[in-house]
Image (cartoon, rainbow, N blue to C red):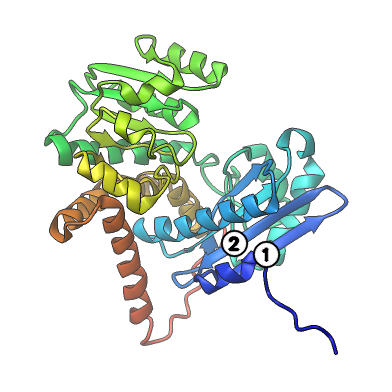
Amino acid sequence: MAKKSEFTNEVFNYTNEGFEQIIYFHNKATGLKGITAIHDTRLGPSCGGTRFYNYQSEEEALYDVTRLAKGMTYKNAAAGLDIGGCKTVIIGDPKKLKSETFFRSYGRYIQSLNGRVYTGQDMNISLQDCEYMDRETDYVSGVLRKGAGSTTILTAKGTYVGMLAAVKQKFGQDNLDGLTIGFQGVGAVVREMVQYLKEHDIKRIYFTDIDQEKIKKFKDLLPLANYVEPDKIYEKNIDIFSPNAIGAVLNDETIPKLNASVIAGAANNVLKDEDKHGKMLEDKGILYAPDFVINAGGVINVYHEMQGYHEPSAIQTTEGIYGRLMEIFEISEQENIPTYKAANLLAEKRIQANIEMRGDYVNTRRRFKWNIE
């Protein structure tokens, strides 16, 4: 008699935690290998970018993709979008594996999911990569024929208006005049924000990065900005700390060093442990603008591409990040809970309200069709 099997794969643990589907895929001819996590499609088809990273193990990749996919569900719901959350990670060295055939193979995989997953740019995925994918799938954003192309523009816009909302809540002012800002990471999003920063009489800007090319580009845009070493940015006496690089930067080691009043930046998952570190920020009197709300401009851009891109509408939805953050700050005060919990509550209530609303009548409208005429 065959020995009774035991399910030890972590995938089954994640599906028990609310994930709808986790898919491993591989194309031997191109070296394509990755994982897609579909977290929730109750509001609509899932949407989330593709991350290309040289993970050290499949377990590390699975942890990252599930964490990011769940975050996309909350981000999309909190942004008022009728889409669910997903994420894909491609495992391998992008400098060695990238090619036309590689991304066309990936496009064919996305097409096979038949619209359950809409994807686009994330770490190490360029516009050119998306163009290759677009030759094989209807479900990729970030290509010029479908809309605005890069999501960077609206990500920067949303982060900026979110920063204004946090300043309004914390300091009661409608601008950044007289404030000091510290940017951790000065990639494309922060460089795009420079045009908005120049509209204000900012007292001082500190910045840091580990990439010398990015440092030079930012210094060229803002010659008076002050570069500091990466480990010194936390200790600066600043009003706004803006994380715009990697996640988990607010943790046991860094929060005690913080000398800021507001956290507002475009990086994902900046709290290493939401419960623990969100509470630590609150105890220090630091106002945290939840990252998945303030950095939603990119997915808002994608959402409008899914419906047929109209730039004024996309900009208007992005500017709505200001109002959503003010609502979150109000919930935080009324419920006496940290802002990250208030943001989660806002997203969960919207998902539940829409599920209940759909109990009546039949909607025959086709919601999502790429505008590719």
Task: Tell me, yes or no, if residue 138 can be seen here.
Answer: no
Q: Is residue 261 above or below residue 356?
A: above
Residue at 34% over, 62% down:
347
Residues at marks 1 and 2 touching, judged by CB atoms closer than 8 Å: yes
Q: Is residue 12 left or right of residue 257?
A: right
Label 1 to label 2: alpha-carbon separation: 6 Å
Q: Residue furthest bottom?
A: 1
Task: Tell me, yes or no, if residue 227 can be seen here.
Answer: yes
Q: Quadrant of the N terminus?
A: bottom right
Q: Is residue 19 left or right of residue 352?
A: right
Residue at 41% over, 55% down:
75
Badge 1 is on which residue?
Answer: 23
Please identify the quarter of the rendering in which residue 350 is found.
bottom left
Image coordinates for residue 86, horizontal then vertical, percent: 54, 60
Name the one closer to the observer, 369 or 179: 179
Image coordinates for residue 335, horizontal then vertical, percent: 17, 61
Q: Is residue 36 left or right of residue 218?
A: right
Q: Earlier in the sequence, mark 1 or mark 2?
A: 1
Q: Return the mark for residue 37.
A: 2
Q: Return the mark for residue 120.
A: none
For badge 1, the amino acid type reads Ile
- Is label 2 in a helix, a strand or a loop? strand
For badge 2, the amino acid type reads Ala
Image coordinates for residue 46, horizontal then vertical, percent: 53, 63
Please identify the quarter of the rendering in which residue 79 is found.
bottom left
Q: Is residue 85 above or below residue 64?
A: below
Image coordinates for residue 5, horizontal then vertical, percent: 74, 79
